[in-house]
Amino acid sequence: MQTDAHIRKVGGRLSREDQRRLGDILQRVYDDVVRQGVPDRFKDLLNELDDHDGEDEPSKAHGDPERDDRRDHLVKAFPHNKGSS
Amino acid sequence: MTMRSSVRDAMLAAVPSLRAFAISLCGNVDRADDLVQETLLRAMANIDSFQPGTNMSAWLFTILRNLFRSEYRKRRREVEDTDGSYAETLKSHPEQHSRVEFEEFRVALGKLPQDQREALILVGASGFSYEEAAAICECAVGTIKSRVNRARTRLAELLSIDGTDDFGPDQSTRAILSAGGQS
């Protein structure tokens, strides 16, 4: 009962406790979506991109310097992402 | 192949939080998922512009925010129409604390100005620092801080409105607020 009046501030700043309460609710609402994980739709999408880049262009798979450069760049860009959760 | 997998893994790892951010922004799960999909496509197409050593998640958030804002300008009206579809996502998650809590909080969140809402979510839920949030929103750190403060104040006001208007029974609001204090 006291919560309602307690949290209301007319033109003032919220107390730390009120901020924490709001923060807790926000975090729970947000985390509830996060816990749903990755929908198949996005797994499929990213796997598809993988396939396209890796296999669907056999003519470019060899001897395309531009492509090799790009790969090098990617390797350098993500040295520590391997196995990250 | 390995680096393809690394890029993909980093993006996959960011997806759950990206979705939560997108849903918070547009209040509509289907649109949010479309936004996430577009973000991933855009990111893959522009992977060369990703700065090595920086935060992949922050980069994706920036892309998603920009996409949302350009789309928002085009479809301003539709954005307000958020009813119903959030319940869809809740159905798929039976363990939630209280559907009422989510619904009422979401409605209140939806009433915040967009700038304040995104700042609050980035800092208060996504776990970004004020500096990272400022980079994502392309504004000053002080601006983010003030938006977050205003968002909190406004949210508290909205949630403590007497339950005659859009918010349903007063008890629900109290339940939200007291639930927040017990954990």
Image (tube, coloured by chain):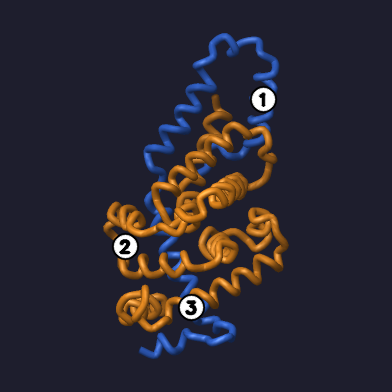
Chain colours: A blue, B orange
- Drawn side of residue B107 relative to residue B128, left or right: left
What residue is shown with label 3? B156
Tell me which residue sits at (57%, 46%) in the image. B67
Specify the subunit that label 1 lies on. A
| Residue A83 visible to an observer of this rendering | no
Tell me which residue sits at (48%, 45%) in the image. B15
- Mark 1 is surrounded, within 10 Å at the Cα level, by few (under 14), some (14 to 19) or many (20 or more) other residues, namely few
What residue is shown with label 1? A70
Q: Position of residue B79 (x, y in %)?
A: 47, 55
- Drawn side of residue A66 relative to residue B41, left or right: right
> What's the CA distance linking mark 1 and mark 3?
50 Å
- Occupied quadrant, residue A45: top left
- Occupied quadrant, residue B124: bottom right
Q: Earlier in the sequence, mark 2 or mark 3?
A: 2
Residue type (three-letter) at the residue carrying disc 1: Arg
Residue type (three-letter) at the residue carrying disc 2: Gln
Q: Position of residue B128 (x, y in %)?
A: 59, 59
Circles 1 and 3, Cβ within 8 Å, touching? The answer is no
Q: Quadrant of the C terminus of chain B?
A: bottom left
* Above or below: residue B129 compared with residue B7: below
* Above or below: residue B79 compared with residue B151: above
Specify the subunit that label 2 lies on. B
- Drawn side of residue B89 relative to residue B146, left or right: left
* Above or below: residue B53 compared with residue B6: below
Give the SS element for disc 2: loop
Which of the numbered marks, if any, corresponds to residue B96?
2
